[in-house]
Image (cartoon, grey):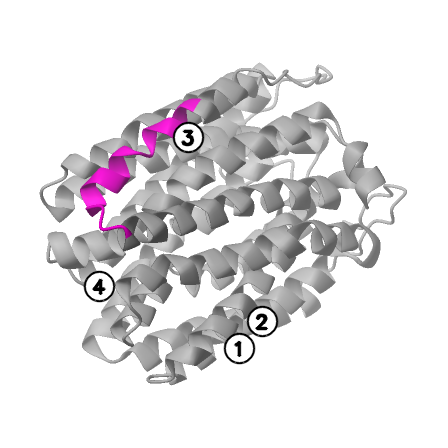
Amino acid sequence: MLKSLFALPSTVWLLGLVSFFNDSASELVYPLVPLYLASVLMAGPKALGIIEGIAEATGSLLKLFAGVLADRTRSTKYWVVAGYSLAALGRPILALAGSWPVVLALRFSDRVGKGLRSSPRDAMLALCVAPHQRGLAFGFHRALDNAGAVVGPLLAAWLLYRGMPIRDILLWTLAPGVMTVALALCIREPRREAPLHKPAFSWTLQGFPPVFKRYLLVLALFTLGNSSNMFLLLRAREMGLAESQVPLLWALASGMAMLFSTPLSALSDRLGRTRLIVGGWAVYGVFYLLLGLNGHNLWLLWPLFAFYGLFMAATEGAEKALVADLAPKELLGTAYGWFNLTAGVMLLPASMLFGWLWQTNSPETAFGFSAGCAILAALLLKFWVPTRSAHASGQPLER
């Protein structure tokens, strides 16, 4: 495993370090937003659902836009740098927010940055490695990303424990943001062969195989039940978990994802992407059922969130590697644009529906709905999306 990791191109390592510093800032903020909304701005689950849904959906529209332009210009680096720069500037300004609509506006700008960088970055990763290294490369990138997601919440928990106000903590996110942009500027643009014809954008996904389109439909169903992770933290807080322990809970999930992302994603290079994704989605469904039904046992939150980290480890890298397996090489940026658009746009109805079900019915109803979507999506991916995984030699999938 170590030999394979050191054989990866420097671009993979640099992108991993960029994600590490970016997520150390982003995930420092992430568990504080529901606390900030509830304790400082006095907003509830509905406001949280609107903020996260609109922010994520808008960012996803830009992911498609940036992916298409990356293919047409055959350039990915400048979109990556611009996206990380915008996020680095927007996060500290959250400390100045005086109402939840202002938080919405700032989260909106943060997601615009993510929208600009995500698809070009994923295309860059896929382009700089061989097909048999895709699972390993995406898994390693996700491992460093999740390492940042461990550092951020741990730092947030320590600062909360020391009594630092949430507003002051938000201001400190500027430091890792500066490191993120500096490292992004060091990345080299990967070489891309000039296509015979300039890729033309089509809302009907012309040029993509049918199996890729089916994959997007199944992904949309899963994402309808995959609302903002902030609801998980809000559930833990409402069950009685101490405010200072909420970031630690998210750090546990991210830590599990960090430890297992690389080996599990690399396993998809040998055993197949679909098997790993189906297993991960099934784990997600069980997690949501148990969290919804668990109303009082605080000790159970810790093994449950560790379980959730395994879901992230098994699926995050494999889902993206499968995109590169199914899409034409000259349309990789656009393919990741469609992938990110599908996942992100569905977060708007997912988060708003989850918040509405929670507030008007019960948490059990909301969590049960999400679990049902995940199980159904796993079954459809297994039996309706006819993919056969490539071997380590890089053989193409059936289309």
Q: Which residue is mark 1?
A: 286
In-front residue for pair 367/211: 367
Residue 41, position as x, y percentages in the image = 11, 52
* Residue plotted at (35% across, 63% down): 245
Q: Is residue 209 visible?
A: no
Residue 255, by quadrant, is: bottom right
| Amino acid marked by disc 1 | Val
The mark that comes first in sequence, 1 or 4, is 4
- Asked whether residue 171 is drawn in magenta, I would say yes
Label 4: state its secondary structure. Answer: helix
In this rendering, position of residue 387 left or right of residue 77: right
Q: Which residue is mark 2?
A: 283
Q: CA distance from mark 3 to mark 2?
A: 33 Å
Which segment did they paint magenta? Answer: 162-178
Q: Are marks 1 and 2 in contact (CB under 8 Å)?
A: yes
Category of crowding for the residue at label 2, using alpha-carbon neighbours closer than 10 angstroms: few (below 14), some (14–19), many (at least 20): many
Residue 54, position as x, y percentages in the image = 28, 47
* Number of numbered discs on residues: 4
Q: CA distance from mark 1 to mark 2?
A: 5 Å
In this rendering, position of residue 70 left or right of residue 246: right
Q: Which residue is mark 4?
A: 45
